[in-house]
Image (spheres, rainbow, N blue to C red):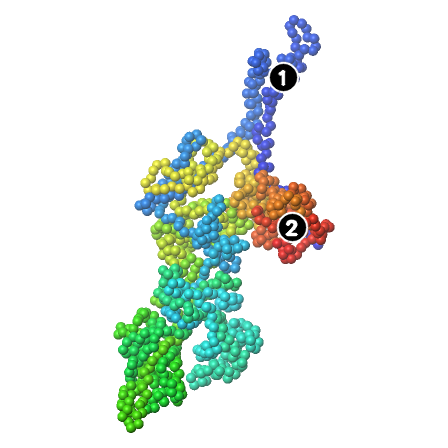
Amino acid sequence: MSKDCNDLTLSGNGTNRTQRLLKSLLPEYVLVDERNMEDLQEFAVKIASELKFIKNEKPWDGTTDWKGFFDQKIQENQATKPHFALFLAFLKLFNFAQQDINGLTKRHLDFYYRDVLHLKEEPAIPDQVYLILKLAKHTQAHQLPKNTAFKAGKDDLGKEILFNSTDQNVLNKSEVTALKALYKDENGRLYKSEIANSADGIGGEILSEEKQWRSFGRPSKLFPEQDRELATIGFAVASPILLLGEGLRKVSLKLSFEPEEGLFEELQKLALNETFEIWFSGEEEWIPATIGWENDTSDEKSAALEFLNKVTHWKEIAGIEPQFGPVIDNPEFGKHRPFKGYDIGEVAAKNILSKRNSLPSKKFASIEQVKEVRGIGEDKYQDLLYTFRQAKHQLIKLDDRIDLILRCQLLPEDPAVVPYQEEVLLQSIHTESPVMKINLANTSQSYGYDILKNCSVTNGNISVEVTGVETLVLQNDQTVLPLGKNIKPFGFRPVKGSNFYVGSQEVFSKSLSSLDLHLQWHGLPEDEKGFEDHYSKYSTRNNESFSVEVDFLNRKEWTPISSENKLFSAADGAPLSENRTISLNEDVWKHISPAPDLEPFSQLSPEIRRGFIRLKLNSPDFGHKEYTKLFAEGALAETPALPNEPYTPELQSVKLDYSSEIEMDLLKTPHDGFFHIGAFGEALVSEDTIPIPLLPHYEQEGELMIGFSDHQISQNIQVLIQVLDGTANPEKLIPEINWSYLAGNKWIPFDQYSVLKDETNGLIQSGMLAFAMPRAADNQHSILPDQLTWIKASVSQNSDAIPDFIGIMAQAIKAEFESNENDPLRVAKVIPTETISKLKIGNAAINKIQQPFSSFGGKTEEAPEDFYQRVSERLRHKQRAITLWDYEHLVLGQFPEVYQVKCLNHTSYDGDLTKYRALAPRHVTLLVISNVQNKNAVDPLRPKTSVAQLESIREFVTKIYPPGVLLHVVNPVYEEIQVKTKVRFHAWADKNFYARKLEDDLKQFLSPWAFETDFDWTFNESLHSSVVLHFVEKLDYVDYLTCFELYHLVINPISGDILSKKRVEEAKGSRGVSILGSIGKVNTYGDHLIEVLETEDCLCEDNIVKPAASIPSVEDLDEAF
């Protein structure tokens, strides 16, 4: 079997900053004469011992020399001999000649470097600072010239420190007063931050020292809903038909969608009855509706009958396979297999329509007639009843559309639905009609935003069924009648033509489909045959004699709608029932248009144009006139036979049931409206054409919205964005930032000429942004708070590759230090926050100056030793990246914040371990380690170089590498070590405390870079389990340990997937990009699997040494985590 080429690794750890410092490159490393005073004196003594000393008075004896003259010391009592002092003076003079000859190397280098190559030390770099300026109260705009000087105190020499503005700036009054963020996770759930610059998105205090906040409101991965508020997304419809004051109110909303390919199948995945929350506008608050209708037996039959009598095409009954509804399969009858053809199909549906249309009335009179249809057995009949018994949401697929039907009801005890009041309900739905609001339920497991946002609405239909309307205006020809009491509808002596008026703004302003007037009579005759017995002495009258004509008031004229309507319920010759219902079906109302402008009223008056029906008494009357005559005749008769008093109609109660249905005008009309409910506000859908989107669209993963107050139209905006370095995820690719502005309720992208300045390099570093604001950018909108001008930054992916923000401030300028014979070392010291607060020369237009952050970017003139090192390296690599040494030293020289670099040639690695290749011609991979002690690091156990830094390194190296090179600049891979063991502590050791300390000590041992400085990083290292075992055993609080196991995990940085997990005796980095370290995070516990033994029992099922073995990933994860 061939060997896996990806296992080939390149040895070496690259170059770190300490290894770059070669003292041999410095001129003083080797001196021509390195002797000091002591060395020269010692040399003189040695030379003198070889010289003969002959006194004048006698010859040399062969033993006398000059040594004694020089082997002396300076006397502290100032008694040094003159010749020795003279000798020391000579040595000090000799030092000048010595220095000159020792400077030969430096002079030679300087001549070559400076005179021949014309190189010199890099000059000092002045530091810069951002300032926030506030204009005086009555100044609307002000031009601040370039080089305006700001005072920053004095330096160590007592000289005044001045910073000058780097550009000409036009200041205005606009300020950042609102920051909002929206984050969309991989499941389509939206998390909003009403106050983005807070700890929790709703204004919680930020406790961290740096006061940073998440740039796009990213929630915690472990507990997202506890960390950020879920956004409420939905839509709303406004219509006068939704004026529903009382009773049992059933509402059905049907929306028709364009049949996009695959949309129906996606919609079927939703649990419809759990997907939506429905609310209605109330007088004091939103009223929650009950999902679905709970029908009783009679209701389900009448609802099914109405459905079958209204449909016009077989597909409205059967739908199109695969489908769910309109008719739902009853699981208690027949075979229950949705989408498999066991519901009402095409043939049966066509037979139903054929049977119905063959009837004289073109309608079924009873649902029982459906059983006579060929192909409709008990199973499918029960399916019909089951469908309308459940009466919940439905999804229907037809040839030219997809219908979504939402059903809900308000119970009699629920409050009245009234016209929308924005000041009460606090949502920006601009309408005077009642509102039905449909939100996506955040509690639903099948959150459907990503599916439902693809729905395009082509048509809308609202139908209502109301039972038990009692708040009516009741009136007869004499007076307005009271509610809640018995009333005389036709007066005390009704005659033919007497009138009873029933009025309701709610009911009669609508286009009705049906109306049932429920009359409950009082004091009816109790005779066996009812009125026939009661009026036996009168001219002929029976139970069916009394009727009324029903007229409808329309445009101040009474229009007859039904001529003969019996007032009482009883067959002729039977006892009377006190309950009577007068039903007026759809045919009566189909020519009467709605009147949504109908104002509330309290009585019928000549000014009333509409709102009443009239019950006009037909002949015969109730015999009041005839009674007087009959009574006189009966009283005078030989055998007195007095007639019964005539019945005067008296009602205990009057109620209305009605149904109404309208086709909505989805575009703006005076009364109807379709609104989007967004994360931060609402908006009328103002599209010019149909279809319109069902939900507001949030396509981006992250959005940050910045609101400016006091901004005038067309004024430029300049803001400072301060980020916290090290808080971005360096494993992710930097996303493109899309900037847009809010015009009305639409986000419009800035064109390429409107982004005047971007020092942030796409929000990955601190800097200023400037925008030329178009005239369309106004402050009148409803999807965000109005009276503010809004701009938005959005990213489609990898929002965590953008660092956290510390602040966003308007009216920012940049100023740079200008030396005025100041201390040369001053630029090495930052100017602390809030130091600069004054101009050198006062300006009445400037009211306040703030310095929110310290100065940055200052650097002293290059030191001589740095100069020689840089030039020496330059002579070797010649500013070209050819060898590994070139790449590593070029990066270290250019980026002082980088600590270590390892170059891998012919290696391809872009952050995804699954695509790692160790034999990849043309590819060069640079592993960068920096910010080892970065206190802002997301994960100190796995320190990463920021995305901005990696991008800067890549851009720098790209300019100097050879043609054809494919460069990757990445962070190393941290492969994790996990310890599993049982341990016994000494008796004096607190078990809870030392269990945690043991885990901390293990992490420090396995990942020392998180706790030490100047650590030498090692790639592809090996770690034997005995080394870790020995470390634990030597801890002073550990008595003994057993069942020791070492696990090696390889995790793909870009995805977080565990590529392998093995129990090993020796762990070794699997790739040339790998570093071994501890599992888990700092200050978290349970990452290493440590069991503290309570007794002396240390038995272990595998006290014997186990061979290294792979453990299946799924089962192993269950065991380990």
For discs 1 and 2, the disc positioned in front in the rendered view: 2
Task: Relative to 993, say whether 605 is above or below.
Answer: below
Q: Position of residue 330 (x, y in %)?
A: 53, 75
- Distance of label 1 from label 2 (alpha carbons): 74 Å
Q: Which residue is drawn at 66% across and 56% down?
A: 1112
Q: Which of marks 1 and 2 is nearer the N terminus?
A: 1
Residue extending furthest toward the bottom = 638
Please name the amino acid that badge 2 sits on: Glu
Quickly name the residue at label 1: 44
Q: Is residue 465 left or right of residue 221?
A: left
Quickly name the residue at label 2: 1091
Q: Position of residue 417 (x, y in %)?
A: 39, 67
Say which quadrant the N terminus sits in: bottom right
Say the numbered circle drawn on residue 234: none
Q: Which residue is drawn at 39% across and 81% down?
A: 579
Q: Residues within 10 Å of mark 1 (few under 14, many from 20)?
A: some
Q: Is mark 2 on a helix, strand or loop?
A: strand
Q: Position of residue 878 (x, y in %)?
A: 56, 38
Say which quadrant the C terminus sits in: bottom right
Q: Position of residue 93 (x, y in %)?
A: 55, 18
